[in-house]
Amino acid sequence: MPEESQTTYREVNDRLKEIADRVADESLPLDDALDLFEEAVGLGMKASDLLEQDIAQRDDENSVNEEDHGVESDESTPLNEGQTDREGNHIPVRREDIDG
């Protein structure tokens, strides 16, 4: 599956799982394994970009909702510990993440 055709995180993740299954096969020729590795690296970067875009979009939506409802941000309010992205920014917990 060419990298350009994957537009959702789920599609990228599914392809990465396929690649992992393929490279687990010890009979896979080295050249094919290297090609799959290169594809996986690109897909990993794509997945990271998609997640960062989603986080930015949610942040934008949250700031608009706060402005619309007169909610002020309180920097002193503690955030959930252990929920940070690669750069140390806190990631909000969504209700569907808790309710399962």
Image (spheres, rainbow, N blue to C red):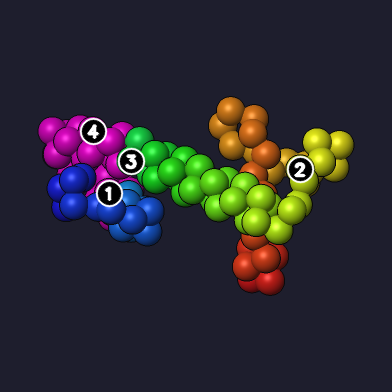
72 or 39, which is in the foreground? 72
Q: How far apart are marks 1 and 2 (CA)?
A: 43 Å
- The amino acid pointed to by label 3 is Lys
The range drawn in magenta is 17-43
**Sequence-earlier tag: 3 or 4:** 4
Q: How far apart are marks 4 and 2 (CA)?
A: 43 Å
Q: Mark 4 points at which residue?
A: 38
Q: Where is residue 39 in the image (x, y as percent from the top left)?
A: 23, 39
- Tell whether label 2 touches label 3 (CB within 8 Å): no
In which quadrant will I find the C terminus?
Answer: bottom right
**Sequence-earlier tag: 4 or 2:** 4
**Sequence-earlier tag: 1 or 4:** 1
Q: Position of residue 72 (x, y in %)?
A: 77, 46
Q: In this view, does 14 lie above or below 96?
A: above
User: Which is closer to the viewer, label 3 or label 1?
Assistant: 3
- Determine the secondary structure under disc 4: helix
Judged left or right of residue 12, residue 39 is left
Q: Mark 1 points at which residue?
A: 19
For the question of whether residue 10 can be seen, the reply is: yes
- Tell whether label 1 touches label 3 (CB within 8 Å): no
- Determine the secondary structure under disc 1: helix
Label 3: how many residues lie within 10 Å, few (<14), some (14-19) or many (20+)? many
Q: Name the residue under label 3.
A: 46
Rendering quarter of residue 90:
top right
- Tell whether label 4 touches label 1 (CB within 8 Å): no
Q: Where is residue 51 in the image (x, y as percent from the top left)?
A: 46, 45
